Image: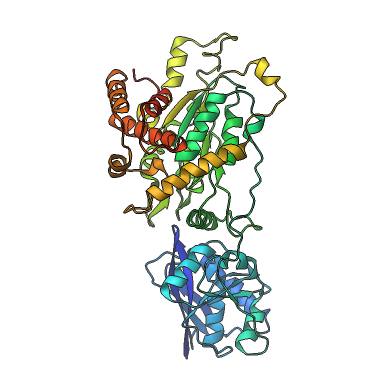
Amino acid sequence: MSLAKVYSASVVGLDAEPIEVEVDISSGKIGLTIVGLPDRVVEESKERVRSAIKNSDANFPMKRITVNLAPADVRKEGPVFDLAIAIGILAASKQVEYDFSDSLFLGELALEGKLRSITGILPVCEMAIKKGYRKIFLPKANIAEAMILKGVEIFAVESLAELIKHFNGEDQIISQSSGGFFDENQEMVFQYDFAHIKGQDQAKRALEIVAAGGHNILMNGPPGSGKTLLARSLPSILPRMTIEEMLEVTKIHSVAGILPNDEALIRMRPFRSPHHTSSAVSIVGGGVYPKPGEISLAHRGILFLDELPEFPRIVLEVLRQPLEDGVVNVSRASGAVCFPAKFILVAAQNPCPCGYLTDPTKQCTCSATTIARYQKKISGPLLDRIDLHIEVPRVEYSKLAVQDLAESSASVRERVQRAREIQQERFSNSKKTIFCNSEMGSEEISQFCILDEGAKQLIKNAVTQMHLSARVYHRILKISRTIADLDNSENILQKHIAEALQYRIREK
């Protein structure tokens, strides 16, 4: 009888937990049993591990083998435990000898013994550093992602046979010290540019404010006016992500399993554009084992909802809490997880089903009842959470025919970057982490939104005459703070409040 213990990790939500893989080999009925709340994929690892060991010139013990994944009350999912189980069996059967106490083993095994890539490497490395694990053995395909964080020794393994030789001293795998080997200042290439957008000066100004302060925006206009083009051009003027933001975004995409093969660290802000037929679960996140949804995949980037009224009402209403709190809480029978969801909501809609209610040249064919029903698809509380509301009219021929390019995205991005740097300096001593003006709470608004007398009187009149809610009042102050930052003004002036009020819909 013999017992071995090795370590692996399981990702729950966006965080990883260490998992002890205990292997006991004893006399009795021949077979391999896995306990510790494994899912179907983990159960099936028995066949993968058996074949991988045999095809790696090692002996699979023909005895009673019990594998326990501890802690037993944490649900284990996915093929990530294959390598740890195989090494545990080899160690318990005395085919390899090694001090496994400070090492993590991760990877899916092919039947021939090769290692396949897995998801969630970044949160595992983060956990390993915090918990004091010094070595991580993982598939060669995951090496780039594992090298992002500093403080752990990485062993890139191609096959189980290669790892067995390493432990037996026959052919050593050269380890690599992680430590952020990436170029954070790499030049960004964007598909769309403001320079090629004809007209729409007010809409482009609104998007500049959106980019500078991280605000939400709703564009309303007839078909073909350029709403989608404006939205897709917005990433080109967003400020460069900080290292903290890059790591947050990469972590989410790693857990979701959509991290690009050629990009270990995501440097460009995400742009997510789900179709209006998407389900609430795909937008918010969830599933039997909760995974990030579109709003979390858009974290620190843009969530673009085209044809907003066409989305089911239940999908739109689930956006209310994330828009307010910047997080989404997903509760399932298997447990509750919290995903970050600090994104810029960019929504576009037609004024009516046919789209031509506000068009000066085409006549609307919709009835008053149809228009009212269409516009009521978006609830008042959701509209309250959208900071800027703008009209995007049809572009006149005289502007379309102009050959000269408009102001480039690079030029706009410089102003946006300066405004963000002002905000970073402003919030550097805050008790909570704040990246931009839209994330300010009541305390920060009182501290940093200082109005002159003319501004105070103007917003007082606006609240009274436009019947603005308390939420809208605070959002106007945030927008005004961003406009003042773009203007390099320490205090909020009357003209900043006046411009902010232009982007609000009148309360009925």
* 370 over 403 or under it: above or below: above
Horizontal and vertical percent for residue 227?
57, 27
* 361 over 151 or under it: above or below: above
The colour scheme used here is: rainbow
User: Which is nearer the eye, 224 or 213?
Assistant: 213
Q: For residue 194, what is the image quadrant?
A: top right
User: Which is nearer the eye, 388 or 71?
Assistant: 388
Residue 295 appears anywhere in the view: no
* 89 over 479 or under it: above or below: below
Horizontal and vertical percent for residue 312?
46, 31
Residue drawn at point x = 70 percent, y = 21 percent: 402
The answer to whether 67 appears left or right of 411 in the picture is: left
User: Which is nearer the eye, 22 or 407?
Assistant: 407
Q: For residue 440, what is the image quadrant?
A: top left
The answer to whether 319 appears left or right of 252 in the picture is: left
Horizontal and vertical percent for residue 466?
32, 20
Horizontal and vertical percent for residue 147?
57, 68
Image label count? 0
* 392 over 55 or under it: above or below: above
Residue 151 appears anywhere in the view: yes
Q: Quadrant of the C terminus?
A: top left
The answer to whether 137 appears left or right of 35 in the picture is: right
